[in-house]
Image (cartoon, rainbow, N blue to C red):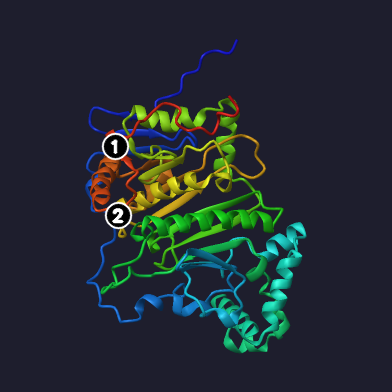
């Protein structure tokens, strides 16, 4: 007979107010010390400057007047009188024929390059992708576009204009395979600044989108994940993340998500899978249920919930899908919309001035265990220092209850202003029922 084993306490508050946290999946130890959370959040911006009339379309290489500065796009979403429509494989001649609400383009500086997959796995472009590359390069505009972008990439790597000009054109074109069949894509939103912005600190973030526009952003991202798996049979996982503002790792302060195909599940998934094999109900017991018992739930709707996370290096809002489906692309439309509404609301409550990372977690494609789709929104409001390096105990300046209160207070106002979905049930309104995550029901 197996001895009874009780889960440890993941959240303990000491008499002096110190909060000690333990992450139930990674074992990361985090302390929140009284007083250190009183520092102001967000960026300290210099005096904002007035924008020129066309600044929103040309502020960075992701903007709509600069489509030709990114690699050839895979697809774009446009807004028509009948709603959103996705256009695929836009030729270079038509880059500016429509205005994209969202674009899917290869990352100019891939984490894992086409050469990585080609040399290590023998990966080559699938026939339809090879045909797309050939057709794009066959046009004068397409060839000029590819060569210009390759030139930008080479200059960034230290090559001079003279060295680039001396390279055979075929050699430069060969460097563009990753533009068509690589495994690192970027989903770019249209606006750099909020529509009608007058100052350069009025940035367009995920939280400034309308709930409907954000839903399209999420739908498009989910579709694009599936596309990368279909493109590369050697990919074991497609990691999805969003870096908002430069302190959180963004190259541009322009709303975008990144999708990277990798050939491993990652250490965090492996650690979680080891525990999940022993307890199929793990995510309910140590995540949603535990958060409910500790009154950390921020909001719920029919198919998703958000709570203040614990055991993270940075203040983290955890957002879970309640769906019985493990793969995001298998979710029903209403389930994806519910996740989008929850993610959007958490961004809106966070605000545009707080640097943050949005990290997606879901079941790796070669895993047969059920697990929920979940998104972590991490506020990058502190800098790791010597204490953390020496002890591996991390100081998180905002405790889970404080994080919950900050977000909940803002959410009520946003819902009244109709800036987030009306379906949100905030704080004490949320049902907080045990085992609300349905991912493991088919197993039971």
Where, quadrant-wise, is the C terminus in this rendering? top right
Q: Nearer the viewer, mark 1 or mark 2?
A: 2
Point 32% across, 51% down: residue: 420
Callout 2: SS:
loop
Give the vertical position of 56 relative to 398 (above or below).
below
Question: In this orientation, which residue lies closer to the viewer: 247 or 33?
Answer: 247
Give the vertical position of 195 relative to 362 (above or below).
below
Q: Residue 120 bears which disc, if any?
A: none
Q: Position of residue 380 (x, y in %)?
A: 36, 53
Q: Mark 2 points at which residue?
A: 419
> Would you identify the image quadrant in which residue 146 lies?
bottom right
Q: Position of residue 365 (x, y in %)?
A: 64, 45
For the question of whether residue 403 can be seen, the reply is yes
Callout 1: SS:
helix
Q: Going from the N terminus, do you reach mark 1 or mark 2 first?
A: 2
Residue 167 located left or right of residue 1: right
> Would you identify the image quadrant in which residue 231 lies?
bottom right
Tell me how far mark 1 sits from mark 2, CA to CA.
Answer: 18 Å
**Which residue is outermost to the front?**
82
Give the vertical position of 380 relative to 325 (above or below).
below
Point 24% across, 39% down: residue: 34
Residue 385 located left or right of residue 6: left
Q: Mark 1 points at which residue?
A: 427
Point 50% across, 17% down: residue: 5
Residue 42 located left or right of residue 63: left
Question: In this orientation, which residue lies closer to the viewer: 255 or 115?
Answer: 255
Q: Where is residue 136 in the image (x, y as percent from the top left)?
A: 67, 78
Question: In this orientation, which residue lies closer to the viewer: 160 or 51?
Answer: 51
């Amino acid at each position: 007979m197996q001895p009874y084993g009780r889960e440890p306490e993941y959240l303990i508050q000491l008499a002096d107010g110190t909060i000690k946290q333990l992450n139930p999946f990674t074992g990361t130890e985090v302390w929140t010390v009284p007083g250190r959370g009183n520092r102001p959040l967000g960026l300290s911006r210099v005096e904002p400057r007035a924008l020129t009339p066309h600044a929103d379309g040309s502020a960075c290489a992701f903007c709509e007047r600069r489509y030709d500065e990114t690699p050839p796009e895979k697809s774009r979403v446009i807004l028509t009188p009948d709603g959103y429509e996705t256009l695929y494989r836009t030729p270079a001649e038509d880059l500016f024929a429509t205005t994209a609400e969202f674009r899917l383009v290869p990352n100019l500086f891939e984490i894992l390059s086409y050469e990585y997959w080609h040399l290590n796995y023998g990966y080559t472009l699938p026939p339809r992708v090879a045909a797309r590359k050939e057709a794009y390069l066959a046009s004068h505009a397409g060839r000029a576009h590819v060569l210009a972008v390759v030139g930008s990439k080479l200059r960034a790597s230290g090559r001079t204009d003279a060295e680039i000009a001396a390279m055979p054109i075929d050699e430069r074109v060969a460097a563009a395979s990753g533009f068509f069949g690589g495994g690192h894509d970027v989903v770019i939103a249209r606006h750099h600044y909020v529509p009608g912005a007058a100052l350069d600190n009025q940035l367009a973030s995920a939280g400034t989108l309308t709930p409907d526009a954000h839903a399209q952003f999420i739908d498009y991202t989910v579709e694009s994940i599936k596309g990368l798996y279909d493109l590369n049979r050697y990919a074991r996982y497609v990691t999805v993340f969003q870096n908002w503002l430069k302190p959180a790792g963004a190259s541009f302060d322009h709303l975008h998500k990144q999708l990277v195909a990798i050939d491993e599940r990652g250490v965090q998934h492996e650690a979680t899978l080891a525990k999940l094999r022993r307890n199929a109900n793990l995510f309910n017991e140590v995540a949603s249920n535990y958060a409910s018992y500790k009154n950390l739930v921020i909001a719920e709707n029919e198919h998703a919930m958000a709570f203040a996370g614990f055991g993270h290096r940075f203040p983290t809002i955890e957002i879970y899908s309640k769906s019985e489906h493990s793969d995001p692309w298998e979710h029903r439309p209403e389930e994806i919309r519910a996740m989008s509404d929850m993610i959007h609301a958490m961004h809106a409550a966070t605000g545009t001035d707080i640097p943050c990372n949005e990290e997606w977690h879901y079941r790796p494609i070669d895993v047969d265990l059920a697990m929920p789709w979940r998104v972590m929104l991490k506020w990058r409001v502190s800098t790791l220092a010597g204490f953390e390096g020496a002890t591996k105990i991390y100081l998180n300046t905002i405790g889970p209850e404080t994080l919950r209160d900050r977000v909940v207070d803002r959410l009520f106002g946003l819902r009244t202003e109709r800036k987030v979905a009306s379906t949100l049930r905030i704080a004490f309104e949320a049902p907080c029922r045990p085992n609300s995550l349905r991912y493991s029901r088919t197993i039971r």
